[in-house]
Image (spheres, helix red, strand yellow):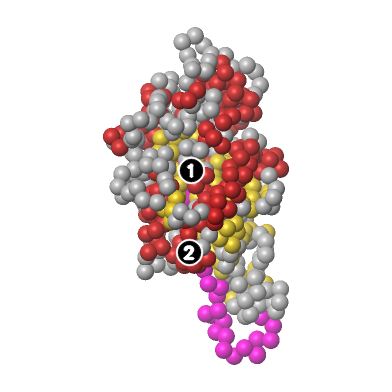
Amino acid sequence: MTAHIPAGRPGPSVQQVFDTDPVPPPPLMRVESPATGLGSGDVSIDRYFDRAWHEREITHVWQKTWQLACRVEDIPHVGDHVLYEIVHDSLIIVRSGPDEIKALVNSCLHRGTLLRTSGGCVKQFRCPFHSFTWGLDGRFIGMPGAWDFPTIDRANFALPEARVGIWAGFVFVNFDADAEPLETYLENLPEHFADFRLEDRWKAAHVAKIMPCNWKLAMEAFCEAYHVSTAHPQVMGYYGDENTQYDVWPGIRHVSRMISVQGVPSPARAGIPPETTIEQMRRDIPFFAGKPIEIAPGSTARAALADRAREKIGRSSGRDMSSLSDSESLDLIEYMLFPNMVPWGGQSLPICYRFRPHGDNPEESIMEIMFLFAKAPDGSHPPPPPITWLGIDEPWANAKELGSAAMVADQDTDNLRRIQRGLRASKKPGVTLAAYQESRLRHYHETLDAYMAAE
């Protein structure tokens, strides 16, 4: 499978690093699947700002795909609900029964008033304008002056619904009644995440920021490591950039993966001492702070860091992590689920990203960062915190719960502002992508183009 990787890619490769790990990764991480047959042409730039493209995207993408709406722990009790809003659409994601979650269209069937403008816990949904009322399951309960509405058939006056699916503790919605089931839409994702067990985690942090760019630009910045040496030079002593592994599987439309190793320097810094790798990782990632990390004779900086990570993850989760692989302890194992979800595997940085348009503006977006921590052995966990919202001019660093991840996000945000403006100024009609290091982006746009071309 490695024949399609450019011959000049610097090493060691991710798989060569895995070969030397004392605790090897799961078998599915030992498979390499570089993209083939994706072509080499430019990607049109109109998809990042054009109003007509944006309008078609509403119809062909947001009305047709499965999208992450919330986590199950966001709505633990009957009546708990959150809003999921995408461009013009608004859904109430509600725990309508102990074992039932519904996605109700957030619009009164009388004169269209939004039934809810925020989440919370209620016993019913009552319009604040004329008191038309529906139950948690969407069934119509009644309204004042019923005598004056002879055309309303109470039995058929239920709130419209979107489809709901659940995977790994995430609640998904789909506006298309004829869409394929979530189970097949996810393709190989459940198999790959079986060992990561995200359903046994809870959302410990959730930060959302309005971004100065199209939602696809924001997502792309976090789905390749080609930009790392320029945009994030501080990580080069402990992070693999040019030797990151990119996987696109034959026949898989919605899912791709990249694996970036940590605890080893970039190929461009291959000669630095292992003590420097540890020192710089401890400098940037508070998780590794505390008592000194010693490298045992004959061992490596990566192995020493993995030992420390297993120790701390085990202590915080109350579980025995001695068999957790070096890779799951340290590495950035990032997947992408079309159209806008980026879940991470492993334990080193348990992140999930979500990207979507900011209202009806194709040149602004909402980027969200969620941290998913392990539940206690008995399944208990604190309640998820409220979302921290950051405005377009507020830095990620204002969200202290993000720790060192905020610095990287701020560096990317500065570049994204320039990219959005630069695309508008460009006289070149397309974006040029690298054959391997940006193959996930090319695969993503191939799937996007297929949805946009569908009848």
Q: Is residue 121 above or below residue 17?
A: below
Q: Earlier in the sequence, mark 2 or mark 1?
A: 2
Q: Measuring from the top left, give residue 242's x and y in whole percent.
A: 44, 32
Is residue 136 covered in magenta? Answer: no
Determine the residue positioned at 57% across, 34% down: 232
Q: Measuring from the top left, give residue 305's x and y in whole percent.
A: 54, 22
Please tell me how crowded label 1 is: few (under 14), some (14-19), or many (20+) other residues with Cα within 10 Å. many
- Cα gap from disc 2 to disc 1, whole angstroms: 22 Å
- Which of the labelled discs sits on residue 53, or is there none? 2
- Which of the labelled discs sits on residue 205, or is there none? none
Determine the residue positioned at 57% across, 14% down: 294
Can residue 318 be seen by looking at this rendering?
no
Q: Measuring from the top left, give residue 55's x and y in whole percent.
A: 50, 67
Instruction: Identify the image quadrant of residue 243.
Output: top left
Q: Which residue is mark 1?
A: 223
Can residue 44 be seen by looking at this rendering?
yes
Q: Nearer the viewer, mark 2 or mark 1?
A: 2
